[in-house]
Amino acid sequence: MALTACGSSSGTDGILLIDEMAQIDFDIDYPVGQITSGVIVTQDFISNADTIKQVWLYGATYMRDNTATVEVRLYVNDDKLLTSWTIDSAQMEDNSIIKLDVPASDLNTGLNGAHCLIEISSPDGEPDLSPTFWMTEENVYPDGHLSINGYQQYNDIWFQVVGE
């Protein structure tokens, strides 16, 4: 999945929020729903890189001010937490790419072929005050699965993993 993005604004703690998109090569049609307390969204994938440098997600605010804290976790080799990020949804722009930097570590090496999992949740998200993330209209990544609260979906979340 290739994309190009432009127009950035700085975040903190290895988080870069991109506020516009120049090109996406597949349709984005559905939000996964509000990331409220108790909602867990996961997308698994097989790494084709030895080291993961960034994870990109495509977020949306429903064109409103939100207050939820969004937690994103990246697991490798099925159950090892590689890293996590906390996103203040009040800082998110509607329909924005969120670039999450992955730090170097002993777990972030030799990952080519490894099973990985992105998990998105919110400890304090409330209805009408929580953001969402976009998913594709179709199963564009057949080697992985999107689940919402444990229910597997046919779609995939919009994501990109940058590695080397």
Image (cartoon, grey):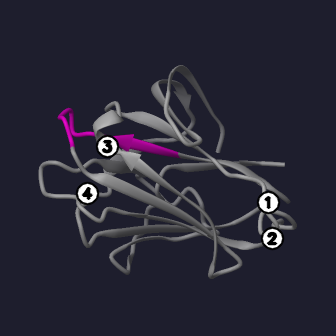
Residue assigned mark 4? 33
Q: Earlier in the sequence, mark 4 or mark 3?
A: 4
- Magenta stretch holds residue 62: yes
| Residue type at numbered disc 1 | Asn
Q: Residue at x 22, y 45 (%)?
A: 67
Q: Nearer the viewer, residue 43 or 17?
A: 17
Compared to residue 23, the image places residue 83 above or below, namely below
Give above or below for 130 relative to 122.
above
Question: Disc 1 on helix, strand or loop?
Answer: loop
Which is in the foreground here, disc 3 or disc 1?
3
Q: Residue 60, percent across and down?
A: 32, 40
Amino acid type assigned to the residue bearing label 3 in the image: Ser
Q: Which residue is mark 1?
A: 48
Residue at (41, 47) in percent of width and height: 87
From the image, give the main secondary structure of the stretch colored magenta: loop
155 sits to left or right of 151: right
Asked if residue 52 is among those painted magenta in the image, a careful observer would answer: no
**How many angstroms separate mark 3 from mark 1 (CA)?**
30 Å
Front one among 118 and 67: 67
Q: Quick one: label 1 or label 2, which is nearer the N terminus?
A: 1
- Which three-letter amino acid code belongs to the residue tagged 2? Gly
User: Dot 4 lies on which element?
Assistant: loop
Q: Give me the C-alpha separation between circle 1 and circle 2.
A: 6 Å
Q: Which numbered dot is residue 89?
A: 3
Looking at the rendering, the stretch of residues picked out in magenta corresponds to: 57-66
Marks 3/2: CA–CA distance = 32 Å
Which residue occupies the foreground of this view, 3 or 81? 81
